[in-house]
Image: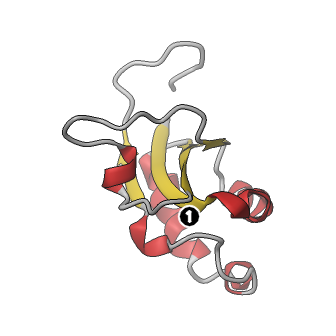
Amino acid sequence: MYVCGLVIPVPEDRQDDYRRWAEMSAAIFKDYGCLEIAECWEDFVPDGKQTDFRRAVAAKPGEKIVFVWQVWPDKERFAKAEEEMHKDPRLDNSGAPPFDAGRIILGCFTPLFTMGRDAS
């Protein structure tokens, strides 16, 4: 198992646009081997004393935080998919995403511990 996580600031009034964009991109990611995606819209994101999700992505007033994780079979499959997806015309023809892609935080992780799923 290999996990890719993202934190994305999205204008609050673009939630429906984001959902459509997420559904479209999830179908493409699935074609390349992604096992699971969770796209989570902000419900409770408190301001921190030193840092927090909003500061991390330079969120502007009126933006909500989306927290995403993708589960891939392994790091190698993720890397191959990333390379192949950048050549896929479906992503080029999908239109501009409903958020400022320059402020996304992305990180990939090898699980140390999981509960509730097979970690193989």
Question: Along the line of sight, which residue is nearer the eye, 71 or 106?
Answer: 106
Give residue 49's quadrant in the image: top left
What colour-coding does the image apply? secondary structure
- Residue at x-position 46% and y-position 41%: 2
**The residue under label 1 is which amino acid type?**
Ala
Farthest-out residue, left: 50
Residue 22's spot in the image, x, y percent?
A: 71, 58
Q: Secondary structure at mark 1?
A: helix
The residue that disc 1 covers is 81
Picture coordinates of residue 68, whole percent (x, y): 55, 46
Pinpoint residue 83: horizontal percent, then vertical percent.
Answer: 50, 73
Residue 12, position as x, y percentages in the image: 65, 57
Which residue corresponds to the image point at 63% horizontal and 43% vertical from the top-left? Answer: 41
User: Which residue is found at the position 68% from the left and 78% from the top?
Assistant: 91
Q: Residue at x 37, y 41 (%)?
A: 109
Residue nearer the viewer, 55 or 87: 55
Q: Is residue 57 above or below residue 88?
A: above
Whether residue 6 sits left or right of residue 72 in the image: it is: left
Say left or right for 13 vs 103.
Answer: right
State the residue lying farthest toward the top: 115
